Image: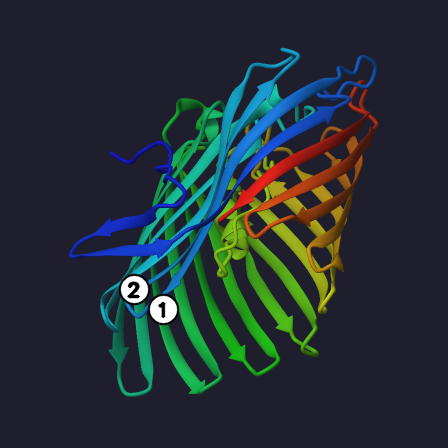
Amino acid sequence: MLPRYPLVCVPGLVLAFAVPSMALAAPIDYHIDLGLEHNDNVNLSEHDPVSEDILEPQIAFGLAQDGATVQAAANGVLQYRDYLGGEFSDEVRGQLAGRVNWTAVPQRLNITVQDYLSVQPVNALQPNTPNNQQQTNVFAVVPTLDFRVGETVRGEADLRYVNSYADKTKQFNSQRAGAALRLIKDLDPTSAISANAEDEHIHFTDAIGGPDYNRYSVFGRYTQKWNKVDLVADLGYMWLNYSGNAFADRDEPLGRATLSWHSSERSTFTLDLAYQFSDAASSMIATTDVQTPTSGQPPAGIAVGDATTTSQAYLEHRLGVGYRWAGERLTFNVNPYYRELDYSDGATLTTGLNETDRGVTAGLSYLLRPLLTLGLAATGENLRYDSIGREDKTWMLSAILSQQWTRNWGGRIELTHYKRDSNVVDQSFDQNIVYFALVYTR
């Protein structure tokens, strides 16, 4: 029986993943924060805001290992929130993004284990207050068998088990079993083409989760790795087959592409687009896996998500572009995006509402002095739920000043303004947060 949550490791020790006849051992980088937050609208109310002070001690860690037998990347945060005014109950929250790959038999068998623990809303239509947040967890195990098909073609066959769990939204809970077959031909040392077939069965473990279904896909893939350009492009077809008669079966073309162009040593352009069937659990794996650090850097804190916590499938249209500049003192990025989710017939408040999301995120970091850094972050979003005629416009502005006093000790001050304008009564609000942390870094 799998644990409901991943095990929490003690920072400063060695993180070990036990597998037959071997163990992964990697030193952990971590920081311990003693934080205090003042929030002038902790209940996110339009007419009756409540001010609250929150004591927030936390431990954040990161690790990375890139060996011949084991490759691993993980980071996480364990946080305690003490609401000093008693407006909400005290709570413990966790976040984890981790992947370990074990080469059990060189050039033959790899076993990959992934786990993603996050904080998500219970009801995405309600303000994201502490009472409207929950822990979600997605755990996956994927053994992959490598084999040869002639002299110029190699193959991969893998099995997949995925378990998704949410504290409160039981329709998110599911177990998944899948298989995939890939035939890959290397065109030259930098490019390859492949034929891929995948099948995944999704079983809801709670009665309110909806009908079980199978997701099938066949597609061709082209990969290219030049000195300055990385490209992965998929083109094929997908099917959703539901058990029973609650939802109609669906089929659509499949298209995906990710492009990264390093135009110079400091500048990088990115492109991400998709037209595919997906769901919240699959999206949590895909999105968080991309963000899992390879440098072993601990995260600054817990990033509360905005997913609709249901395992119900949807047709996703996604387009994102980005630009990043990384200088000696100045680093900044800007990422506009568009996303549309079209749920299966019969979508409701408990399964998911069709939505269209347009927005942009931006960030800047500037080294004022060798030990003093200024950071700025901004987001803007226009989210529409066409089936219920709702539109929410949100903005977030944040300024962060970080000072390192000694090798181990530092401090951080953050000022954040959050604003939502909604066409629904009592769903608009403003919020201001002041946060200070004393930080010990290993």
- Tell which circle, 1 or 2, labels the residue nearer the N-terminal end: 2
| Front-most of residues 180 and 190 | 190
- Residue beneath the point at 41% across and 83% down: 186
Mark 2 highlights which residue? Answer: 157
- Check the image and report above or below for 191 versus 91: below
Q: Position of residue 276 (x, y in %)?
A: 56, 54
Q: Position of residue 291 (x, y in %)?
A: 55, 54
- Residue beneath the point at 74% across and 44% down: 400
Q: Residue furthest front?
A: 406
Can residue 42 be seen here? The reply is yes
| Front-most of residues 111 and 26 | 26
Q: Residues within 10 Å of mark 1 (few under 14, many from 20)?
A: many
Mark 1 highlights which residue? Answer: 182
Q: Position of residue 130 (x, y in %)?
A: 61, 22
Report if the CB atoms under discs 1 and 2 are less than 8 Å apart: yes
Color scheme of the displayed model: rainbow
Q: Position of residue 49 (x, y in %)?
A: 78, 16
